[in-house]
Image (cartoon, coloured by chain):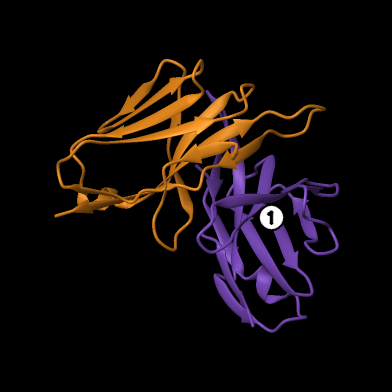
Chain colours: A purple, B orange
Amino acid sequence: SAVISQKPSRDICQRGTSLTIQCQVDSQVTMMFWYRQQPGQSLTLIATANQGSEATYESGFVIDKFPISRPNLTFSTLTVSNMSPEDSSIYLCSVGVFAVVGHEQFFGPGTRLTVL
Amino acid sequence: RKEVEQDPGPFNVPEGATVAFNCTYSNSASQSFFWYRQDCRKEPKLLMSVYSSGNEDGRFTAQLNRASQYISLLIRDSKLSDSATYLCVVNRPRSGGATNKLIFGTGTLLAVQP
């Protein structure tokens, strides 16, 4: 599986500010995704990061709040804009790899965000 | 009703015990199924994909029953290091060429006691 790193690993931010999270993969991958895991909850898909075009957002998530960049096949960023305490969560990037059963996803270590 | 449902546990079992987790899914068009393991304050890690005929990986056995829309994970000879949250994950197909979406269950917490 691919080796995935995220920066920062954690941050504490003031409301109204923005934070950009970086995701770097050690090999070229077609599929990259951004998820959120709120305290005590399971993972929710925010968007699919598409290389060379706009990200595909899931219901409930919009580009103005969560702009995503994917300049190449190994890198993506997620920005959490105009933060509020409700945005406190773990943000994870993942990559999809084709396998016998379809595509399997592997996750980065996550970014733990606290908004005050 | 949630698309993927799991018993949240916790399951408290002694070392060496056999424990089984169950999961049901509601979308009959789902094609791929997985078990992930998530340790406290860590990212989910793929434990095993679930094949139609069932599959085994060491002490772990996964089964799929498409008719009942049911997936299971059996852990034999539990170790202390098996303590974690086990996430049932289903791949939901989407139309129009959109990338399939993984739907995560809320997880079952396993605590293996010495």
Q: Which residue is mark 1?
A: A75
Front one among A75 and B91 = B91
Eyeballing the image, is A4 above or below B103? below
Judged from the image, the secondary structure of the residue bearing numbered disc 1 is strand
Could you tell me residue B35's position as x and y percent? 44, 37
Residue A104 is at least partly visible in this image? no
Amino acid type indicated by mark 1: Phe
Tag count: 1
Front one among B82 and B113 = B113
Could you tell me residue B27's position as x and y percent? 62, 27
Could you tell me residue A11's position as x and y percent? 59, 77
Eyeballing the image, is A68 above or below A17? above
In screen coordinates, is A61 left or right of B106? right
In screen coordinates, is B111 left or right of A55? left
**Chain letter for mark 1:** A
Could you tell me residue A24's position as x and y percent? 62, 57
Instruction: State the residue at coordinates (56%, 33%).
Output: B90
Residue A18 is at least partly visible in this image? yes
Eyeballing the image, is A47 above or below A16? above
Instruction: State the residue at coordinates (44%, 63%).
Output: B41
Instruction: State the residue at coordinates (74%, 66%).
Output: A79
- Decide: few, some or many residues near mark 1? Use Cα within 10 Å; few <14, some 14-19, many ≥20: many
In screen coordinates, is B43 left or right of A47? left
